[in-house]
Image (cartoon, helix red, strand yellow):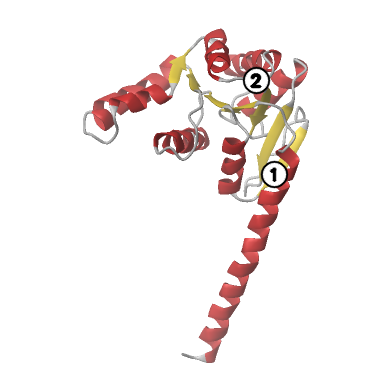
Amino acid sequence: MPRSKQYLIDDLSMKESWRLFKIMSEVVDGFESLNDIGPAVSVFGSARIKPEEPLYKQTEQLSAKLAEAGFSVITGGGPGLMEAGNKGAKEAGGESIGLHIHLPLEQGANEFVDVRCDFRYFFIRKLMFIKYAMAYVAMPGGYGTLDELSEALVLIQTKRIRPFPIVLIGTEFWGPLVDWFKERLVRDGFCREEDLDLFRVTDDIDEAVGHIKRHVIL
């Protein structure tokens, strides 16, 4: 092998080795920052929703009710429904936590975060969402929301973590996806019918919070 290629391989190996230290550092920082938070619910949703839109107000109300019920609220710490989640919790006197991810198209952290963690790696951020949440609430959102939702469903389905409540807010938004689960995944044998019991779909915020309270011991 030409010496120049060998140097390139050695350089890449060295970079990968050093990356492990960055990963370890993020894990440690996350554990240290979040270790003392109270019982928490992770709330997910689109970063593209504006404060004047009904979904923003609904998410704000949801988080306020979660805070009043004794839960801290964890979001991705960015704009849109993440901001609404942090704002609702903070203004209701609850603990507001933001797990902020650095992206090429930078989205800043919102102003309603009390406890902030910064991440470069999505998989570490997802670890923190799972580790420190006693329940998940998914508002309407895009790929990021679907990613977090599917991660939790897989971990519970495969018994890698203890089951916890997962609530999808918005029957009109989530209904077609649930129908596809039934008509394709269950029918074709890709998952069991009882796997559909891993989550609940509702439009009612009080029902969502009540469902979480019934299944979580504070």
Compared with residue 16, is residue 85 higher up or lower down, i.e. above or below?
A: above
Q: Secondary structure at mark 1?
A: helix
Residue of label 1: 31
Identity of the amino acid at label 1?
A: Phe
Dot 1 crowding, Cα within 10 Å, few <14, some 14–19, many 20+:
some
- In the rendered structure, the answer to whether residue 165 lies left or right of residue 93 reads left
Earlier-in-chain disc, 1 versus 2: 1
| Place of residue 153 in the rendered image (x, y in percent of width and height, measured from the top left) | 44, 33
Identity of the amino acid at label 2?
A: Leu
| Place of residue 186 in the rendered image (x, y in percent of width and height, measured from the top left) | 26, 29
Q: Residue 194 occupies which quadrant of the picture?
A: top left
* Residue for point 68% across, 15% down: 64
Q: Nearer the viewer, mark 1 or mark 2?
A: 2
* Residue for point 69% across, 34% down: 98
The circle on residue 193 is none
Compared with residue 104, is residue 206 higher up or lower down, i.e. above or below?
A: above
Q: Residue 40 occupies which quadrant of the picture?
A: top right
Residue situated furthest front in the rendering: 217
* Residue for point 66% across, 50% down: 27
- In the rendered structure, the answer to whether residue 201 lies left or right of residue 70 reads left
Residue of label 2: 218
| Place of residue 31 in the rendered image (x, y in percent of width and height, measured from the top left) | 69, 44
* Residue toward you, 111 or 184: 184
| Place of residue 68 in the rendered image (x, y in percent of width and height, measured from the top left) | 70, 13
